[in-house]
Image: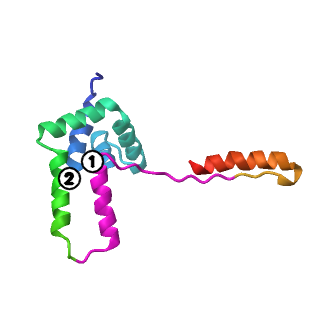
Amino acid sequence: MNKLTYKQKAFVSEFVKTRNATASAMSSYSVKNRSVARQIGSENLAKPYIRQSIDTLLQTSGYDPKSSIAALIDNQEAGKGIKATAGDSIRASELLLKLSGSFIEKHQQTVSLSMNLDAMNVEQLLKLKEKYDRFLEK
């Protein structure tokens, strides 16, 4: 297992307190620029040995994700009948899924493509259509 540097240890400790990678990086790495801190925080959270240190620290401090999820579900049940927006309900469901590890974020990408379709014959156009139909199904 990789050993954590002094700054990485400070990041882990700060992240467990704040749950904010950007703020933790700003504090631990003495960074003033938020975009630089966001990058450092993202890189740190992508490192398995840092994630392991965070999980270990959370467990030793008594954090149990199952009890947090159960508390959210209890609060959701207790809140039934109370006026809430659809956005509140969606956000609560999203948090439950994230905590349980079942939430999969989808990212949308835009691609720009230019082709001279007039110069293609019917066979080439059909192959192109087939190719992009498969691409769009994913």
For numbered disc 2, what is the local secondary structure?
A: helix
How far apart are the alpha carbons under marks 1 and 2? 7 Å
Residue 10 seen: no
- Image-based side of 125 in relation to 25, left or right: right
Observer-nearest of 107 and 49 = 107
Q: Residue at x 21, y 39 (%)?
A: 13
Observer-nearest of 59 and 19 = 59
Question: Which residue carries the number 1 mark?
Answer: 100
Q: Residues within 10 Å of mark 1 (few under 14, many from 20)?
A: few
For marks 1 and 2 on the same chain, the one whose residue lies earlier in the sequence: 2
Residue 5 seen: yes
Number of numbered discs present?
Answer: 2
Which quadrant of the structure image shows residue 81? bottom left
- Image-based side of 46 in relation to 59, left or right: right
- Image-based side of 119 in relation to 35, left or right: right
Q: Residue 101, relative to residue 46: is it above or below? A: below
Measured as percent of width and height from the top left, residue 97 is found at: 31, 52
Residue extending farthest top: 1
Q: Residues within 10 Å of mark 2 (few under 14, many from 20)?
A: some
Which quadrant: the N terminus? top left
Q: Residue at x 27, y 49 (%)?
A: 99
In the image, residue 46 lies in the stretch drawn in magenta:
no
Measured as percent of width and height from the top left, residue 4 is found at: 27, 27
Kind of residue indicated by mark 1: Ser
Which quadrant of the structure image shows residue 82? bottom left
Measured as percent of width and height from the top left, residue 51 is found at: 29, 35
Confirm or deny contact between disc 1 and disc 2 (CB under 8 A). yes
| Residues rendered magenta in the picture | 83-112
Q: Residue at x 31, y 50 (%)?
A: 98
Question: Which residue carries the number 2 mark?
Answer: 69
Measured as percent of width and height from the top left, residue 137 is found at: 59, 50
Kind of residue indicated by mark 2: Ile
